[in-house]
Image (tube, grey):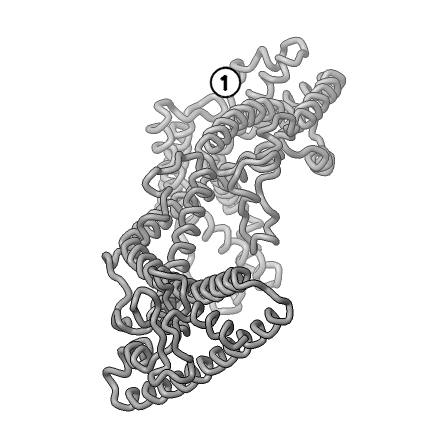
Amino acid sequence: RDARAEAGRGRLFPAGAALRRSPHRTRSCDCGRRRSLTPPHLLGCEASAGLFYWSEASVERFPRPPGGAAAREGGAHAHANANASSRIAKMEALRGRVADKLEDTLGKLGTLWDRIGISDAERDSYLEDLGGIMDELLTDAVETTAARLRDMEEEVRSAEASVVSMNVKLGNGPVGCADQPPADAPAVVRRDAALAKLSELRDFFDARAEHLKTVRDELHGLWEALGAPVEPEYENVDEDLSTPRVTEFEARLNAVRLEATERREAVVELVTSVQGLMQSLKVASVSTLDMQIMGALAPASEAGGSRSLVSDLRTESCVGISSEALEQVTIRQAELKVLEKQRRDELTVLGEAISKLYDRLDVSEEEQAAFAASVHGLGEDTISAGQRELTRLQGVLVAQLSDMVAERRETITQLWDEMGTSDEGRAEFRDVMEGEVSEDLLTAAEEAVAKLQAQAAALRPILRHIDRRAELTALRTSHAEQMKDPEYQALLTGRSRQARLALKELEATEKGIKKELPKITEALRRRLKAWESQAGKPFMYQGRRYLDRLEDEEAQWESARQQEKRDKVGYRAGAKRYTAPGRSDKRPKAGPRERGE
């Protein structure tokens, strides 16, 4: 039994030596190469399917994965040596467990085979299968670890490639992972460093890409709202994320924002104007464009006191800010302004006719204000109300036509009298004064009244002077006659209260005649000459040129006064006054009492 077990163990271990008895604890495979049985340095033998085990030489040849930090720092050397010693101890313990377990298993198998009575061929086959299983298990462990190493190396390469790609897109050039561990550093160290650099750069890269996409999306939205085509050079934001490219995008966005702001202001102004016109004209929102215009503006309270559009895009209830919308609203504004002018002109004609009838019929201000308050805007209802009011007033005019013509004729007569118009001047309006009553005659009479009122207004300053001069000349004549009255002379020489009052009145009259009358006459003379020079005709008053009449009156008065003086001189020359002996012929001056002071 022991011989068969030893024979089986010899098949399992071709070198034929006991595991624990080996001085170097090594075995050789059929290819003559020494191999380690423990990962990560367990490699499958290409020459046979035998099992390989540890040797001290293999441990020294593959002590640990090399580390760059340990080579650079003295303290790291000690730490690496400590780790290596720990690893060797663990590997020795594992090798012992495996050898003990294998020896125990082979012993038990031999005992069981003996009890079963298994033939040598079956034992050989079974041992070959067991060796293949163990070989496959250990080979898989090596390949799994090697695959892990390859994956780490691939992660490092992928991270470095991503860093280079992002740096190129950011405009930094093909720059890889700077300040990375050396190539002989452990793969896990190089992988972690590369992933850290990639994560750091990706945060910046993603932030810039997101910013550029936001700018692009806003640009596309503004172009859509403005009705402008998308500019191709501002579509791709994946290939170039450099700072100049971002600056270019931002500058273009600012320019388009400014254009959109100006377009909004223009559309808001137009929409506000069109809304006002539609409300004033009372135009119903029937068309789609009118409904979009009427719903385009947000309430002032929601816009912070200023008016703004509900949306930049065209919707069922908003016109938007596209170039097409701007053109359509502009055309609509022009149409409404034409309609507004037509209605204003029509209402102006109606208003003038109504106002004229109000003046003709002497309609009270309260009645006029009541009608004005009942209409507003430029709608068709306002025009209809004006037409109804005009028709009503025309009916009243027909009923009161005779009385109104009579009133105008009376006014004409009064103006003639005021201006002293001669019969020849009055003949100008004979048709008005004698024609058959009609609306045309009333119009002619009103025109005559207006013309005469204008003439009277221009002549009233002269007529006032004429009236005042007439008063003063009449006073001058009456005063001259009064001074010839002996009784009045006797009253003036008396000492009674009545005499003093008469003397005061005399002084006031003489003052007015001597001071005011010459001034009035001279001013009237200047005004008449200026009027005649401007009018190009003589100023006629009561059928005669008044300037000639004035000069004749002044000449007549001066002639009468000179004659009176001559008469007084002749009387004094022929009269002899009696003078008492011892008295002077001169009279003493009157004292205060005699003068009535």
Camera sees residue 586: no
Instruction: Using the image, determine if residue 195 lies above or below residue 250.
Output: below
Q: Nearer the viewer, residue 3 or 570?
A: 3
Within 10 angstroms of label 1, few (less than 14), some, or many (20 or more) residues?
Answer: some
Q: Residue at x 44, y 23 (%)?
A: 544
Q: Is residue 377 left or right of residue 13?
A: right
Instruction: Using the image, determine if residue 476 lies above or below residue 247.
Output: above
**Outermost residue to the top:** 436
Quadrant containing the N terminus is: bottom right
User: Residue 37 location in percent, x, y?
Assistant: 40, 73
Residue of label 1: 425
Q: Is residue 259 left or right of residue 446?
A: left
User: Residue 253 location in percent, x, y?
Assistant: 37, 48
Instruction: Using the image, determine if residue 260 lies above or below residue 61.
Output: above
Q: Nearer the viewer, residue 526 or 441?
A: 441
Q: Nearer the viewer, residue 482 or 493?
A: 482
Task: Identify the image quadrant of residue 24.
Answer: bottom left
User: Residue 309 location in percent, x, y?
Assistant: 54, 44
Task: Identify the image quadrant of residue 495.
Answer: bottom right
Identify residue type, mark 1: Gly
Q: Residue at x 58, y 39 (%)?
A: 296
Q: Residue at x 53, y 68 (%)?
A: 593
